[in-house]
Amino acid sequence: EKITRLIQYATRKSLPLIICCASGGARMQEGSFSLMQMGKISSTLLNFQFHENLFLVSLLTSPTTGGVTASFGMLGDIIIGEPDAT
């Protein structure tokens, strides 16, 4: 939710955004709410990048695997990865 709010704030202010990812993904114990957040973040980034035409840098740190990589980790205009990040 905090990431979604950050993206919405950057959209309102027309600011570029750098997102640093370091996650093994959502765990089953976190439930469906956690899974839905990745979709919500990706949807908000779609508006940020394509409708508002704002700039996004994705920084993938070690480890970044699973759903984060598959969802918003790879959506940046520029994607920078540490060695062994994925």
Image (tube, rainbow, N blue to C red):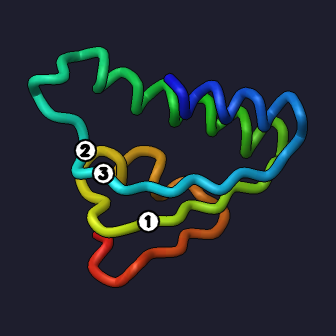
Measured as percent of width and height from the top left, residue 7 is found at 67, 35
- Location of residue 26 in the rendering, given as x and y in whole percent from the top left corner: 23, 36
Q: Position of residue 65 (x, y in %)?
A: 25, 57
Near-viewer residue (47 or 83): 83
Q: Which residue is mark 2?
A: 25
**Is 39 rendered above or below residue 58?**
above
Q: Secondary structure at mark 1?
A: strand
Amino acid type indicated by mark 2: Gly
Query: Tag 2, which secondary structure?
Result: loop
* Of the image marks 2 and 1, the number of the one nearer the N terminus: 2
- Corner quadrant of residue 31: top left
Residue 50 image point, x, y percent: 74, 43
Specify whether 40 is left or right of 65: right
| Secondary structure type for disc 3 | strand
Quadrant of the image containing the C terminus: bottom left
Q: Residue at x 40, y 32 (%)?
A: 38
- For the residue marked with disc 1, what is the amino acid? Leu
Q: Which mark is residue 23?
A: 3
Residue drawn at x 89%, y 34% is 13
Residue at image point 29% right, 44% down = 67
Please, is residue 30 above or below residue 27 in the view? above
18 vs 65, left or right, is right
Q: Residues within 10 Å of mark 3 (few under 14, many from 20)?
A: some
Label annotation for residue 60: 1
The reply, left or right, for residue 28 in relation to residue 78 is left
Q: Do the numbered discs 2 and 1 sit on residues whose CB atoms are within 8 Å?
A: no
